[in-house]
Each structure stands twice: as structure tokens, then as C-alpha cells.
Image (tube, rainbow, N blue to C red):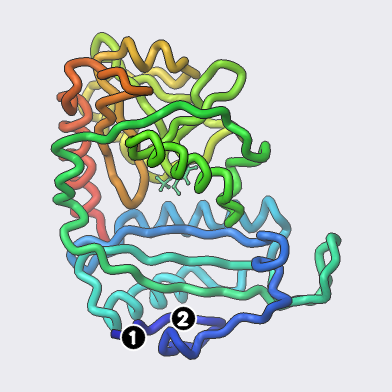
Amino acid sequence: MSRTVYLNGEYLPEEEAKVSVFDRGFLFADGVYEVTSVLGGKLIDFDGHAVRLQRSLDELEMDNPISKEDLLEVHRQLVTRNEIGDGLVYLQITRGAADRDFAYPKDAAPTIVLFTQAKPGLATSPLADKGIKVISIADERWGRRDIKTVQLLYPSMGKMAAKAQGADDAWMVEDGFVTEGTSNNAYIVKDGKIITRHLGNEILHGITRAAVLRFAAAAQMQVEERPFTIEEAKAADEAFITSASMFVMPVVEMDGEAIGSGAPGTVAKRLREIYLEESLKAAV
Ligand code: PMP
């Protein structure tokens, strides 16, 4: 079935949505994106994503072609038109089409695209009962990972390296410390304390991370925001990742070695429950 997608103010069948070959997203990866989860037809943490989108655009001096209110309306329209129960809405804004030049064009109109992907049963992923396996790789991305750009080739390479080793994902390491997963934030739990890297340019400021740390604090769980090593991860009681599409996902193996008991830990399980429950309550 053909989806309806949104392109520059129009709702179109996906086959009819076309972007210029001169689009700077295509030529320079000069674009930013957001992924918002949909559960039961409602958007999870829309506000957080809209705020981060604006920040990414500001950092790149890129115009925002849409107001927050209109953006919410487009998200809702796509969810309705494509009959999304559980799934996600992908949003991308690029600097638009212009003659190829490294300097930003002065008057290009930004390109804005949104589409949906259905993921039935997203919140009841059997993967969460098993947990995922990760490997460690060097972090060879650029230095502004706090900007959510569409240049995702290194994370793709990391994901492929993980698959080649029979694992699900990779945690990236820089100067001896874990930065984050290829498309998620990384956490370990030791002696009841949740440890995750502090915010900075080295990682994406996850919307799910912010929510989970808020819920953890409200549940009187101890949180320490600091860098940690792969050795600490291997010796941890448990580990997990967070992202808008995975929520809280336990990690049970690092570089072939079991973490803790080798099964999802109690802290990760509890945080997943709290996150889903609270996020659903606040969903729009
Ligand atoms: N880090 C990276 C590198 C990511 O790509 C993502 C997800 N896009 C995250 C962290 C998690 O962010 P969020 O919780 O906002 O999905």
C-alpha cells in the first residue's frame, strides 16, 4: 500500500514525492532529522523532538520552514492518513536545492519531508525480554554529534560490523570512554547506580535519555552522569540503551562477554516499564 508522505507543504502519495538532485541533503548531508515514536496512534515526546529540531537548525544556521503547531498537525495527519497505531514519524529538513558550493546558499528554500513507518507491537518488542548484544568500535564520527544531522554513514558501518559479529549494535569508544551506541544512548548499572555519559558535543542529547533520567530521579534511583569504559561495562551488573524507537532496551552482552547474569537486569526492566507508562500518559 502506498503511504502518504509530506513534502514542502503537500500531502502526496509516496511515488509522487520528489526532491531535487541539487538538494544539499543529497549532495552534502546538509540536513537534520528527528524520529518520533507513535504508540496507540499518539506521539511520544513530540515537544522534546520539536525543541531539539530547532536547536539542530540553529546550530547549522538553517531556516525552520514550519511552526511547532503546524509540525504537530503534519505529524497527526500522517499518523491518521497512514493509519499508524504503533510506529514512527520520520522528519527531515535540509538546506534545500542550490548550485553545488561548500558555502551555504543565501536564498535556498529548505526542503521538509515527513513520512511514517508502521511498527506493529513496537512497545511489546520480544527483543526487550531477551536483551541485545553489542560490540565496541572506535568512534570515528565528526565532532558535533549533538547536532542531529543526516550524515549517518559511520553509524551504519558500525551496525554492519556488529551484524558481522552476530551482535545487534555497537557502542563507540573515544579516548578510552564510551560515547554512545550507533543510534542510541548508552548506560551501565553498578551497585544500583545508573551511569551514563554526561552531555556534550560528543553525544546526541537523547530525548529518551532526558525522560528516563527524569523518571529515574523521581523513582529515587541514583544516577551518575560521567564517562565509563568498556571494561566497566563488562564488569557492570547490567547495561541498557535508550532511543525514541527502542525506548529502554537491555544490553546483555559486550564483545562476546555476558554483562551481569547475561539476562536483562531489573533496573533496565523497571525503567522500560516506567518510561512506557509515563510517556503514554503524556502522549499527544
Ligand atoms: N544517539 C544517537 C547517535 C542517535 O542517533 C539517537 C537516536 N536518533 C540517540 C542517541 C537517541 O536519541 P533519542 O532518544 O532522542 O531517540
Q: Amino acid at mark 1?
A: Ser
141 or 59, which is in the foreground? 141
Taking the image as shown, residue 48 lies to the left or right of residue 83, namely right
Q: Tag 2: residue type? A: Tyr
Q: Position of residue 271 (x, y in %)?
A: 21, 33
Tell me, yes or no, whether the two marked residues, 1 and 2, touch with CB atoms within 8 Å. no
Question: Which quadrant of the structure image shows residue 111?
Answer: bottom right
Which residue is at a point 46% across and 15% down the rendered structure image?
A: 229
Q: Position of residue 84 (x, y in %)?
A: 24, 72
Q: Which quadrant of the rendered structure holds the C terminus?
A: bottom left
Quadrant in the rendering for residue 134:
top left
Observer able to see residue 187: yes
Which residue corresponds to mark 2?
Answer: 6
The disc label shown at residue 2, or none: 1
Instruction: Name the residue: 59% across, 24% down.
Output: 174
Quarter, ligand 1? top left
Which of these two is toward me, 134 or 58?
Answer: 134
